[in-house]
Amino acid sequence: MADHLQNPGRREIMQRLALGAGGLLTLPFVADAHPIQHHLRDTTAIALADAQSQATEYTPGFLSAPQLETLRVLGERILPGSTKANSAEFIDQLLTVAKAEEQQEFLRAMGAFEQLALTRANMPWKQLTAAQQDELLTRASTEKPGVTSPRTTTPARVTIRDHFEHLKGWIVGAYYSSEIGMRELGWTGNVFFPEFPGCTHEGGHA
């Protein structure tokens, strides 16, 4: 069997899943309006981002090196296994071709968690202990979301919960579009996936 069939990349996985979904694939566990949804439908962008994210000596494309490391740490706490799936690197590559407003929203969310760490523990996020990170993520994931104006889907007041959901969407999308993530859901490489099973991931905040 050819190597690409034994170890399919994100592009091939999403193409196979799209066949089973009638051509229009929406990744489960992520809000339909989240920007990663439309990025994962661009097979050319997926292939390029996936290939570049697996470089042995990875060089960030959009994020700075410290931001990338913080994203790795956040990703692993939100969804264990994200590091092995190169989720942070894949997100970084998608952000290089994202719209300016998507890039800015992502950086605001990252900045909010850095500020939370500095405010609560007087140190950067990546220097927090696992227990401290879990405590702050639990706080962020259970806070009330911002109030949305009736005329727009953008919260008039953004809370740490909104920033958490935004980052989680990128991390979950990057993880479950990978072979590691899909096999965790029971995917065996078949063209058709009758239905997406529920996420049974133990631990994490996804």
Image (tube, helix red, strand yellow):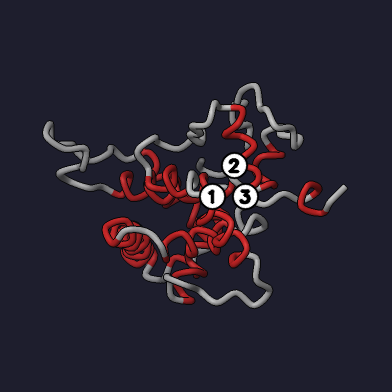
Q: CA distance from mark 1 to mark 2?
A: 8 Å
- Residue 16 visible: yes
Q: Residue at x 69, y 46 (%)?
A: 179
Q: In which image quadrant can residue 141 be found? A: top left
Q: Secondary structure at mark 3?
A: helix
User: Label 3 amino acid?
Assistant: Arg
User: Label 2 amino acid?
Assistant: Met
Q: Which residue is mark 1?
A: 43
Please state which of residues 159 and 99 is positioned toward the viewer in this rendering: 99
Q: Residue at x 62, y 49 (%)?
A: 10
Q: Which residue is mark 2?
A: 14
Q: Nearer the viewer, mark 1 or mark 3?
A: 1
- Contact (Cβ within 8 Å) of mark 2 with mark 3: yes
Q: Which residue is mark 3?
A: 10
- Contact (Cβ within 8 Å) of mark 1 with mark 2: yes
What x and y, as percent, mark residue 38?
42, 44
Label 3 CA crowd tier, 10 Å (few <14, some 14–19, many 20+):
many
What x and y, as percent, mark residue 152?
16, 37
User: Label 1 amino acid?
Assistant: Thr
Q: Secondary structure at mark 1?
A: helix
Q: Earlier in the sequence, mark 1 or mark 2?
A: 2
Q: Earlier in the sequence, mark 1 or mark 3?
A: 3
